[in-house]
Image: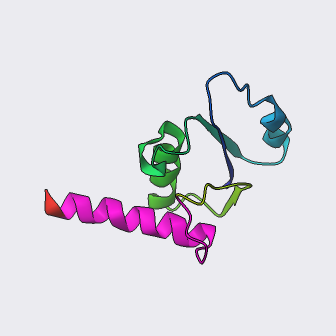
Amino acid sequence: MRIKYNRVSTLQQSGDRFSIDTDNYDLVLMDKVSGTISFKDRPSGQELTKLVEEGKVTELIIEAVSYTHLRAHETVLDLVCRLLLEKKKKKEIK
């Protein structure tokens, strides 16, 4: 499944500029949240993480990621893997 993830910073932003994306991807996800909200705490971030865990994602496109969540040396795949590992560690601790 080809997935595109987008985020806008405020509820006032429509995200209409992403509407053309629906023709190019199997699924387009968008969160309307501040960049200070962790990816794993975003509704679409959680949905995307679940799809990755289920092995359903073959391609992931993210146009812009806040540097508070993406370290300068990380690729998008590194980000997703790191988030999945953090989630797994939390489950093991409980």
Q: How many marks?
A: 0
Question: Where does residue 72 sit, x and y in percent of width and height?
Answer: 61, 73
Q: Residue furthest bottom?
A: 73
**In front: 74, or 58?**
74
> Magenta: predominant secondary structure element?
helix
* Quadrant in the picture for the N terminus: bottom right
Residue found 61% across the figure and 24% down from its top: 11
Q: Which residues are magenta?
A: 69-92
Q: Colour scheme in the image?
A: rainbow
The picture places residue 15, in percent across and down from the top left corner, at: 74, 31
Is 86 on the left-hand or right-hand side of 81? left
Q: Is residue 29 left or right of residue 48?
A: right
- The answer to whether residue 57 is magenta is no
Q: Residue 12: image x %, image y %?
A: 67, 21
Q: Residue drawn 30% across and 63% down?
A: 88
- Check the image and name the residue furthest to the left: 94
Please state which of residues 3 and 7 is positioned toward the viewer in this rendering: 7
Residue 86 painted magenta: yes
